[in-house]
Image (cartoon, rainbow, N blue to C red):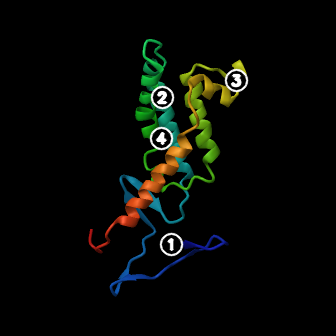
Amino acid sequence: MVESKKGQILTCKISRKGDNIKQTYQFKYLGFLIISDAKYDTKIKKRIATAKNTFNKMSPILKDRDISMKTNMRTLKSCVWSVLLYGCECWTISNIKKKLEATEMWFFRRFMRVSWTDRKTNEEVFQLAGMKRSMMKTIRNRQLKFLGHISRKKWTGKR
């Protein structure tokens, strides 16, 4: 799929060893529907809502003062971020980057029990947690790993 400047989707004829490869406009990969127009905003917003719901269900564990901060951070990343970032390898995130960063901040503010009325900046919240912003970096790393897998794959033309 190639998209022109005016938003038209152009078709490409690709052949391998004399066989034409069929162009599809959508396919499912690991339960995630990949579509040719690459607009995933609504799907990402659903992922954000699902991850926030997961966070709220796990908040008694994540906010427990008897569990170390390091363990809680691992729990947050393994249980909540995994829900949010499922299928992120295929996302186009330019339009929704701020929403994802706001979601990351939402998690940290609740995790650290910092209210908006406390008048703490986002940087102060991250310093308090001893962390740095890492969600966008995680998404980018996953996308690059996926690209590496795709580029190394040997295409046989069979499923």
Query: How far apart, in angstroms, are the residues tagged by discs 4 and 2?
Result: 10 Å
Q: Quadrant of the C terminus?
A: bottom left
Query: How far apart, in angstroms, are the residues tagged by discs 2 and 1?
Result: 37 Å
Badges 2 and 1: C-beta atoms under 8 Å apart?
no
Query: How far apart, in angstroms, are the residues tagged by discs 4 and 3?
Result: 25 Å
Please tell me whether mark 2 or mark 3 is closer to you in this view.
3
Residue type, mark 4 in image? Leu
- Secondary structure category for the residue under label 2: helix
Query: How far apart, in angstroms, are the residues tagged by discs 2 and 3?
Result: 21 Å
Please tell me whether mark 3 or mark 1 is closer to you in this view.
3
Nearest to the observer: residue 110 or residue 7: 110
Residue at 71% over, 19% down: 117
- Secondary structure category for the residue under label 3: loop
Residue type, mark 1 in image? Met
How far from the left and from the top, in percent, is residue 54? Answer: 45, 31
Relative to 152, is 132 on the left or the right?
right
Nearest to the observer: residue 150 or residue 109: 150
- Secondary structure category for the residue under label 1: loop
The disc placed on residue 106 is none
How far from the left and from the top, in percent, is residue 52? Answer: 51, 32
Badges 2 and 3: C-beta atoms under 8 Å apart?
no
Query: How far apart, in angstroms, are the residues tagged by discs 1 and 4?
Result: 27 Å
Which residue has dot 1 on it? 1
Q: Earlier in the sequence, mark 3 or mark 1?
A: 1
Nearest to the observer: residue 35 or residue 121: 121
Which residue has dot 4 on it? 84
How crowded pointer 1 is (Cα within 10 Å; few <14, some 14-19, many 20+) is rated as: few
Which residue has dot 3 on it? 120
Residue type, mark 3 in image? Lys
Please tell me whether mark 4 or mark 3 is closer to you in this view.
3
Badges 4 and 3: C-beta atoms under 8 Å apart?
no
